[in-house]
Image: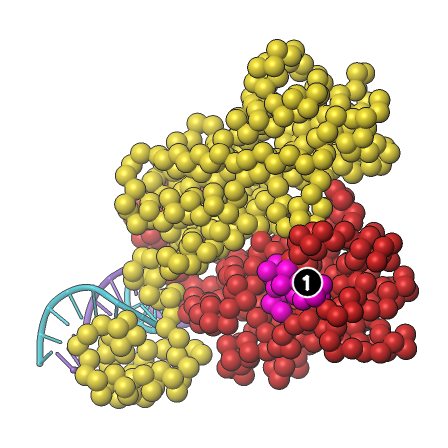
Chain colours: A red, B yellow, C cyan, D purple
Amino acid sequence: MTATVRDVARLAGVSAMTVSRVINGQPGVSAETRQRIEAAIAELDYAPSKVASSLISQKTGLIGMIVPDVSNPFFGPIVRGAETTARRAGFKLLLCNSESDLRLEREYVTDLISHRVEGLLIAPVGDSSRQNLGRYVAGNFPIVLLDRLIAGLDCDSVTLDNIDGARQLVAHLIAVGHRRIAFVTDADEVSTGRQRLAGYRKAIEDAGLPFDEDLVFHTTTDQMGGYRAAQQVLAAAERPSAIFAVNNMTAVGVMQALRQANITVPDDMALACFDDVQHLAVISPFLTVFDQPAEDMSKAAMQLLLERIGGTAGKQARTVTFPGKLIVRVSSALPKRG
Amino acid sequence: MTATVRDVARLAGVSAMTVSRVINGQPGVSAETRQRIEAAIAELDYAPSKVASSLISQKTGLIGMIVPDVSNPFFGPIVRGAETTARRAGFKLLLCNSESDLRLEREYVTDLISHRVEGLLIAPVGDSSRQNLGRYVAGNFPIVLLDRLIAGLDCDSVTLDNIDGARQLVAHLIAVGHRRIAFVTDADEVSTGRQRLAGYRKAIEDAGLPFDEDLVFHTTTDQMGGYRAAQQVLAAAERPSAIFAVNNMTAVGVMQALRQANITVPDDMALACFDDVQHLAVISPFLTVFDQPAEDMSKAAMQLLLERIGGTAGKQARTVTFPGKLIVRVSSALPKRG
DNA sequence: TTGTATGCGTTATCAA
DNA sequence: TTGATAACGCATACAA
């Protein structure tokens, strides 16, 4: 296991160089010698060290990937797609969970750079991630942003058309008959939140309804954030008939708060959000969502990254936008009571 | 970005060695020299290469992790927990999806070894994974098995008490009134399937019911496998009143087939399975499941691995078994019709 | 067809 | 307190 080329060479009675040739499938080795070397390799369980070869070639075959949380059903497929695409190109994935923590993200980035990953695929925490990434982008280090853009950072990216997605979702709610629709979203610092807010607003204005600032509830976009925000929604003077949650975890938190308050969806309150959870929809098709093709987006992003690593990309930053699709289920219906 | 110690040394007017000392926080460098070096490091955006230092220290700070599929809601939290624990110990995670493919698994294992990961945390494909892992276990390379054991491989492991879990789940179905319970599971080659079958059988015999081989349907434990198996269940001469699916994806497939056949759960047929999907349960608490503490199991497994890497483990293989818990929801009720 | 020398970027060792 | 040298494991360039 800890055998080196030299050990193999000694056992086979040749030089280290000849062993190296056999390993890399280079020509110029007699069949007989090759056989002896292969026997020695098997005998010693020799596995060539990528650490050493990386040092020479300046290529580690490693790609860094940072997401807020792999266990989030949106990011699971994202990571899966990226890994599959990377593997097919001969790369391995170093996976990091930033926990939406800017400092942790920075730590990961510098660590990954030290490990000499050849590129970085990242769903950044937010606009502030620019602090963590700016210098590398400036230094032409291969980076692709996924899911979220970073204001002021000109960089390859793959995102959803969040504005139109949110517009479609809210337009649907309006079509169903909702007039007061709360939007539970994150701080202005995250591009997805900003864009979805723009779409929300557009749908409302398209319908000739008044845009009401008070119906936008800013929070953290995790379960607890959704929970808290929903409580605020319920406490509002004039209660909305529907809640639009900016993403899946937020919707879960909203649901939790509603249930606790004995409010049934959609009989008492409608609910819709971004991100579908595929298999779960089979078990219980309940939530109306705007579905993002997470795995495809991630594969596309990895493809961009591979091109940049391979040098076939050109200097210009490339922007890929996916459409996504509205999936109407029961949760968005107009309340029967109230 | 591609600056080396020497570049820094030159800029600071010192030797490479002194730079190295500063980077590693070693003593014996005057405050003034240290400052000059730190300035040079910042100036050049210097990031020390772990590739080079790994070569010397023989430690990469890398841990390999192989799971069938991160996007599976059971493995997402598994990977998340492992990564968190690894990070806190200063390790990074190389993530691989075996796709339950033995050849792919082997390829990953050898690749990871070449990358000189210091240990391997793996949810193996099945007993045949012994081919892929046996030599490394024999060579005392740090490996911990997670979720699944491998017959004949004496190795650290963290698993659930599958026998008792399945027993509890099936005992519940019997208590509710079910008498003919189908079990949809995988080939005998996977330890979890074997153990859950044993638990299924035990619950049935404990209740004084006859164990019927024909009620055990072997298939692949993915959605398609569950789908096909459910169709067989429905075609059975004497139709069971409940289906016990060996895991989450299988249950999804079963559900899909039932829905397609216009069979409502639980009005026409009950359903229960292993693995809960936490947040989803909030959205729609429907499926009766036996819940595994995936993230905790994974953290424990990583802990075992870290101990083995650190050499504080002892030669004996350690076996950790988690209990899990039954969560009764509506899907397991006794059918009203039929 | 095979081998020797050299260097990748870093650090351990020993010397100054 | 600082530096010169060698070595980690492999591969490139060149020589034999």
Query: Is A42 or A131 nearer to us in this picture?
Result: A131
Residue B17 visible, this angle? yes
Left or right placement of residue B258 versus residue B164 in this view = right
Which image quarter: residue A336?
A: bottom right
> For the point 61% across and 36% down, which residue is it?
B327
Query: Is A54 or A170 nearer to us in this picture?
Result: A170
> For the point 42% across and 44% down, which residue is it?
B300
Left or right placement of residue B78 versus residue B303 in this view = right
The span shown in magenta is A219-235
Residue A245 visible, this angle? no
Q: What amino acid is at disc 1?
A: Ala
Numbered disc 1: secondary structure: helix
Whether residue B53 is in magenta: the answer is no
Left or right placement of residue A276 versus residue B35 in this view = right
Can you say which quadrant of the picture contains the C terminus of chain A? bottom right
Q: Mark 1 lies on which chain?
A: A
Residue A252 horizontal/vertical position (percent):
67, 55
Can you say which quadrant of the picture contains the N terminus of chain A? top left
Residue A215 horizontal/vertical position (percent):
75, 72
Q: Main secondary structure of the magenta part?
A: helix
Figure disc tally:
1
Residue B49 horizontal/vertical position (percent):
38, 70
> For the point 41% across and 36% down, which residue is it?
B320
Q: Name the residue under label 1.
A: A230
Query: Is A194 or B143 nearer to us in this picture?
Result: A194
Whether residue A232 is in magenta: the answer is yes
Which image quarter: residue A18?
A: bottom left
Left or right placement of residue A154 versus residue B234 in this view = left
> For the point 29% across and 84% down, which residue is it?
B37
Which image quarter: residue A337?
A: bottom right
Q: Is residue A197 above or below residue B34?
A: above
